[in-house]
Amino acid sequence: KIVSFGARALYLGTKPEPSTQYMHSKYRNYDAKIREYADILAVDDSSLTSSPPLVMVDVYPAFVELGNPKTLYDNDRLHLSDHGYASYWDIWTTTALADTTDCVRWKNNACDAAGTTTTTTSTTTKPNVSCENDDTWTFTNRKNKVKNCNWVGMKPGRRCNKIGDDGTTVASEACRGACNEACL
């Protein structure tokens, strides 16, 4: 009911804090679930409101793209510094809250996914999901063997959280055909 009155929630995704590296794969998995849920809500509720009911600011991959510099964090390497808030977090939040379009996901202060893109099957409407794998994505394991999305697809539950050799691209983003449940 609350959505019919135009209410919406803004979720700022997890961030790759240097002091919590042991949790990063869980963070990425959690954010992937929120991404998927936001997409589903946007499609399900597209007739009720012009703005999606759940909007995500995808912080983790944005911080990784920035190189996740130490200047983003306080000395505890967990909480954001004044610089982290002022230069990114606050700006991204303000932009997403001010938006009146159908943007479901924001990354680096730009709309990364709109909610009205849908494809229709015989009885249901689903988000338009790309199931293409990036043929250039690679991951080099401890034995110095180069792996690709085919390797990820053999054990997606364990491998979709791997960060590629470029240091920024997570397998779940590059290997959508292997990692996205809608593609399996």
Image: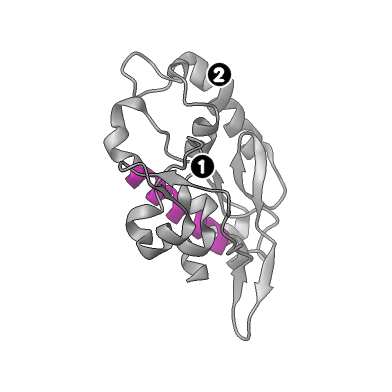
- Return the mark for residue 66: none
Quadrant in which residue 118 is drawn: bottom right
- Residue at image location 38% in from the left, 16% down from the top: 74
Q: Amino acid at mark 2?
A: Ala
Q: Which residue is mark 2?
A: 86
Q: Earlier in the sequence, mark 2 or mark 1?
A: 2
Q: Main secondary structure of the magenta part?
A: helix
Which region shows up in magenta? 25-41
Give the percent coordinates (x, y) of residue 154: 38, 64
CA neighbours of label 2 inside 10 A, class few (<14), some (14 to 19), many (20+): few
Report if the CB atoms under discs 2 and 1 are less than 8 Å apart: no
- Residue 156 lies left or right of residue 59; in this view the side is left
Distance between mark 2 and mark 1 Cα atoms: 25 Å
Give the percent coordinates (x, y) of residue 54: 54, 52
Figure check: 156 above or below 27? below
- Residue at image location 69% in from the left, 53% down from the top: 102
- Return the mark for residue 169: 1
